[in-house]
Image (cartoon, helix red, strand yellow):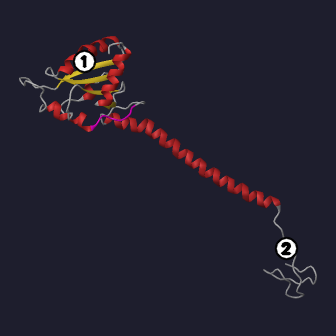
Amino acid sequence: MYCPTCNFFATNTLICVNCGKNFPQLRKPKWAKSKARGHQNRSYMKVILILLLIGASYGLYTKYFMTRDFLSAGIPSGRYATRALPSYMIDGPINLEKKAVKGRTTIIDFYSDYCPPCKRISPFLRKLDARRDDIAVIKIDINRRGVEGIDWDSPVAKQFRLKSIPHFIIITPWGKYMCEGKEAYNYVVQQLRAEGLA
C-alpha cells in the first residue's frame, strides 16, 4: 500500500514506516456483508433441505418396505394398530391371529361350562354378535375333554396365563391386539350397554 503523504510503499502495516502517518482504513463495501449473510442463509437452507430429504425417505421406507417386511414375517400391519399381538399369543397352540375376523372388532371370550359368570354373560355376547356387523365374538373353551370343573391346568389356560374367567381379549379390525383383561371386560360391557343388553 502506498502512503498518501510520502508515496512510500509498505506492506501489511497500518502506519507508514517512512513518515509515520496512519494509512486510511479501508472499509468493506456493503455488498460484501450482505453476500456473506446470503452465504450463511444458503448453508442453513442446505441443512434444512437435507433434513427434509432424510425425513421423507425414512417415511417412504417405513410406509412401503417395513410393511412388506412385516407381512412376509407373518405380522399383520394396520394403520390404526396399537401394537402387535404378544409373542405368547402367536407361538402357542392357539393362534389368535387366525381366529380374528378381518374387518370386524373381534372379542375373544375364554370361558368354561363350569363357570357361572361365563354362562350368565354368554347369551348377551351371542346377541351382541348377531346385532352388530362390526363386532365378532369368538368363544374359546379352556377345558380339556373329560376334566370336570374349571381346568386351570389346560394348555389354553397356561398359554394365555389365565387366572380368572370370563377373560376377554379384543383384537382390532386390522388384526392387532387392542386390550385384555379388565380393560377388555370394560369394553365388552360398554358395547353391551350401547345395545341395551346390560
The amino acid type found where label 1 is placed reads Ile
Query: In the rendered structure, are the residues bearing label 2 and label 1 in contact, judged by CB atoms less than 8 Å apart?
Result: no
Query: Picture coordinates of residue 59 (x, y %)?
Result: 48, 40
Going 31% across and 23% down the picture, which residue do you hit?
106
**As drawn, which residue projects farthest toward the bottom?**
18
What is the magenta range?
Answer: 81-86
Disc marking residue 75: none
Residue bearing mark 1: 121
Disc marking residue 25: 2
The amino acid type found where label 2 is placed reads Gln
| Dot 1 alpha-carbon crowd within 10 angstroms: few under 14, some 14 to 19, many 20 or more | few
What separation in Å lies between label 2 and label 1 (alpha carbons)? 95 Å
| Dot 2 alpha-carbon crowd within 10 angstroms: few under 14, some 14 to 19, many 20 or more | few
Q: Nearer the viewer, residue 49 or 84?
A: 84
Relative to 93, is 32 on the left or the right?
A: right
Going 21% across and 27% down the picture, which residue do you hit?
165
Which one is in front in this view, the residue at disc 2 or the one at disc 1? 1
Relative to 48, is 138 on the left or the right?
A: left
Going 45% across and 40% down the picture, which residue do you hit?
61
User: Regarding mark 2 in the picture, which secondary structure is present there?
Assistant: loop
**As drawn, which residue projects farthest toward the right?**
5
Chief secondary structure of the magenta portion: loop
